[in-house]
Image: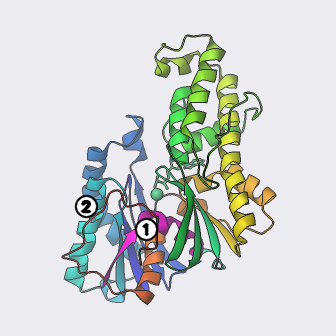
Amino acid sequence: MKVLGIESSCDETAASVVEDGRILLSNVVNSQIDIHAQYGGVVPEVAARSHIEVVNPVINQALADAQLTWDDIDAIAVTYAPGLVGSLLVGTLAARTLALLKKKPLFPIHHVEAHVYANFLNNKAPEFPMLALIVSGGHSQLVLFRDHGDYELLGQTQDDAIGEAFDKVAKIIGLPYPGGPAIAAAALDGDPFAYPLPKAKLAGAYDFSFSGLKTAVLRAVQREVGVDITFPSHELAGLLSDVQRDNFAASFQRIAIETLVDKTQRAFTAYNPKSVVIAGGVAANQELRRQLSERLPLQIDYAPMNLCTDNGAMVATLGYYYAQKKQPTNPFDLEVIPSLSMTKTTW
Ligand code: KG4
Ligand code: ZN
């Protein structure tokens, strides 16, 4: 079964064809990073307009790269939640129209759940029960999957998402957007023990909090450059030396990643899963992969970097499993849900 997956929930317009939920036939991603970098973050209105311009060419390219025509496509899967409303509307409208026009079954996909399914494109599919650490720009959560579509949220961030913390700390220390890759690169040259930073203590055993860590970085930067708290924070960065910047990047990254791994290790001990997967943009982080592999007593099969950030392949892959168990949705009825969390099974 060949599924076309369409993704447009944030600042990537993406389409991909996946066969039987495991063979990647094409994967086209049009990133808007260059457009948004000049503003220091994603501008929703600009994102929606850019999706409109490229959504059709991206879909056509996904078919062409797979050397397929519409006759070969068995179903369409599209991200309908969560995300930026204007961005979600463009992808879903394209998918709804194509489903009607080409007479294909349509499956609405939850973006965060789809991130987990990038791991099903590995050589060997993860086994259930599967513990998933989902770490993206908008989410930080630990989810236990007992089967496809049967999952339980164990814990999540109480404030900032981990990717958001990377992006905000990057801004404080003068690194470009997106902050995750920029901090990871700077951290390679820094001392991860240069600055002592706190780990949040929370009531929920598997919950996270990153806003205190972000503020702790800001205060430490202010102390380091000797400028008072009322000084505009965006001007602080210019006062840091390259060495200080690299040291802050490395110290922040170490503590942020340790926090994730502490909770993942705790959940692993409590639930004894057969596999552990990481998903979302921050799953591309090498320090996260290093610490997890070092501290968990099982081999983790990591998804390739390009499938960790937003893409259509993860959407098509989850779409395949939906197609095995669920009825397709009526294209006329599909609505976007910008803030649907992944608290319980949606199947
Ligand atoms: O999953 P994603 O592409 O979009 C959302 O659904 O949010 O994740 C984007 C996030 C951004 O916050 C970005 O800074 C972060 O993933 N990110 C990283 C790395 N690559 C991307 N964070 C840490 N280390 C990386 N190598
Ligand atoms: Zn994402």
**Percent position of residue 340, x then y:** 37, 61
For marks 2 and 1 on the same chain, the one whose residue lies earlier in the sequence: 2
Residue mark closest to the camera, 2 vs 1: 2
Tell me: is circle 1 under 8 Å from ligand 2.
Answer: no
The main secondary structure of the magenta stretch is: helix
- Which segment did they paint magenta? 105-121
Residue 111 in the magenta stretch? The answer is: yes
Quarter of the picture containing the C terminus is bottom left
- Seen from the viewer's position, the closer of residues 75 and 233 is 233
Residue at screen point 54% across, 80% down = 23
Residue 15 in view in this figure: yes
**Magenta-span inclusion, residue 300:** no
- Describe the element under mark 1 as helix, strand or loop: loop
**Residue 297 horizontal side relative to residue 143, left or right:** right
Q: Is residue 85 left or right of residue 282?
A: left
Q: Is residue 214 above or below residue 18?
A: above
Q: Which mark is residue 312?
A: 1
Which residue position holds label 2?
A: 89
Disc 2 is placed on an element classified as helix
| Spatial CA span between label 2 and label 1 | 16 Å
